[in-house]
C-alpha cells in the first residue's frame, strides 16, 4: 500500500460507478491513500467483486457498497436515504458512473437513457445529498467530464435536450457530457460560501467496460486506446483529497492536474436554465 494519508481518517467518500472504469480507478486511488470508500452499483455482485479487488490490490478493506439503478429516480432517492441512515457524514461525492448508449431508450421515468444515467442521475443524487455535504464541510463534489478537446464549445440543445427528436448515440453522449460540465460549474456557483466545492475533470484514458455495448467501430477505437488505459485514476484521487485545492471550485481539471480554463467561457444563463429544467425533470 502507498503511504496512508492520516488526514483522511474518519472521512467518507461516496462514488457512483465504483465497480468499473473511472469509478473503480478513482476508488483504487483513494483506497491506496487509506480512504473509506462507499461505491454504488446496480448489482451487489459487481460491487463485492470490485471491493475484493480493491482490498487485494491496496490492503484497504474498509470499502462498503450500496445498490441502486441510476436510471431510476426512485432508486436514487432510496440510495441517498440508505446512505444517510448508514453514515453520518459525507466528505466527497464522486459522480463517476456512466455509459454509452447507441440505442434510443427511455427510462421508467420517461427520460432518454444516456441523459438520465450520465447526467440527471448525478444532478438528483447530488441534490439529495447536499444537506449532508454542507453539514460535513469542508466537502467536495467531483464530477467526471471528458477530454477537454471535445469540450471547447459546450452547448446545451434545450430544444431537444434528451435527443428525442433526432437520436444518435454520439450526440446523446456529448449532450450528457456537456450537461455534466455545466452542472458542475453551476453547482459551484450555488455552493459559494458553504465550504463545499464542485469541480469537473478529465480522468484520462482509464481501463473501462464502456465500449462493450457499442457498435464494432467504437469497439475498434476502444481497442486502440486499450494499451494506454490506466487502472488507477490518480487525478480523481487527487481532486477528492488534496489539501492544495481545498477551496478550489468551479473549474475543470485535466488528467495532469492542471486547470483548463473552460470556466472562463461558462455561460451562467445556460447553467441556470439547465438547473431549472433538471429540477422539473426530477419533479422538484
Ligand atoms: N474510461 C475512460 O477513459 C473515460 C474517459 C473520460 C470520460 N469517461 C466517462 O466516464 C463515465 C464512466 O465511464 P467508465 O469508463 O467508467 O465506464 P464503465 O467501465 O462501463 O463503468 C460504468 C460504471 O457506471 C456504473 N453504472 C452504469 N450504469 C449504471 C446505472 N444505471 N446505475 C448505477 N450504476 C451504473 C457501472 O456500475 P454497474 O455496472 O456495476 O451497475 C460501472 O461502475 C462515462 O460517462 C464516460 O464517458 C470515461
Image (spheres, rainbow, N blue to C red):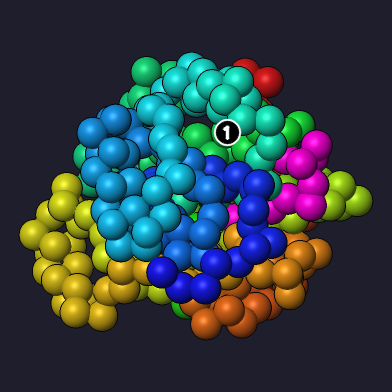
The extreme left residue here reads: 216
Left or right: residue 230 versus residue 29 is left
- For this rendering, which residue is in front, 172 or 109? 109
The residue shown at (27%, 65%) is: 207
Locate the C terminus by quadrant: top right
Mark 1 packing: few (<14 Cα in 10 Å), some, or many (20+)? many
| Residue 43 versus residue 27 in the image, above or below | above
Question: Could you tell me residue 20's position as x and y percent?
Answer: 30, 51
- Residue 272 lies in quadrant: top right
- Span shown in magenta: 133-142
Mark 1 highlights which residue? 125
The extreme right residue here reads: 193
| Residue 115 versus residue 26 in the image, above or below | above
Q: Secondary structure at mark 1?
A: helix
- Residue 258 lies in quadrant: bottom right
| Residue 23 versus residue 158 in the image, above or below | below
Amino acid at each position: 500500500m502507498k503511504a496512508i494519508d492520516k488526514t483522511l481518517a474518519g472521512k467518507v467518500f461516496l462514488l457512483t460507478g465504483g465497480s468499473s472504469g473511472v469509478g473503480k480507478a478513482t476508488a483504487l486511488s483513494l483506497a491506496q491513500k487509506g480512504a473509506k470508500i462507499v461505491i454504488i452499483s446496480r448489482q451487489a455482485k459487481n460491487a463485492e467483486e470490485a471491493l475484493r479487488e480493491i482490498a487485494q490490490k491496496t490492503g484497504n478493506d474498509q470499502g462498503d457498497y450500496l445498490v441502486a439503478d441510476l436510471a431510476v429516480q426512485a432508486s436514487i432517492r432510496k440510495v441517498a436515504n440508505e446512505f444517510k441512515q448508514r453514515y453520518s457524514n459525507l466528505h466527497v461525492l464522486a459522480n463517476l458512473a456512466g455509459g454509452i448508449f447507441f440505442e434510443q431508450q427511455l427510462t421508467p421515468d420517461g427520460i432518454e437513457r444516456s441523459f438520465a444515467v450520465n447526467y440527471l442521475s448525478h444532478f438528483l443524487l447530488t441534490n439529495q445529498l447536499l444537506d449532508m455535504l454542507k453539514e460535513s464541510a469542508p466537502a467536495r463534489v467531483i464530477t467526471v467530464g471528458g477530454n477537454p478537446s471535445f469540450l471547447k464549445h459546450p452547448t446545451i440543445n434545450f430544444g431537444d435536450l434528451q435527443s428525442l427528436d433526432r437520436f444518435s448515440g454520439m450526440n446523446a453522449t456529448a449532450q450528457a457530457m456537456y450537461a455534466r460540465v455545466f452542472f458542475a460549474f453551476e453547482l459551484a456557483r450555488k455552493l459559494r460560501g458553504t465550504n463545499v466545492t464542485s469541480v469537473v475533470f478529465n480522468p484520462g484514458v482509464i481501463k473501462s467496460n464502456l465500449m462493450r455495448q457499442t457498435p464494432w467501430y467504437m469497439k475498434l477505437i476502444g481497442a486502440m486506446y486499450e494499451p494506454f488505459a490506466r487502472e488507477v485514476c490518480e487525478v480523481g484521487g487527487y481532486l477528492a483529497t488534496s489539501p492544495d485545492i481545498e477551496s478550489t471550485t468551479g473549474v475543470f481539471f485535466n488528467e495532469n492536474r492542471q486547470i483548463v480554463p473552460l470556466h472562463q467561457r461558462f455561460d451562467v444563463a445556460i447553467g441556470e436554465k439547465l438547473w431549472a429544467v433538471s429540477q422539473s425533470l426530477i419533479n422538484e
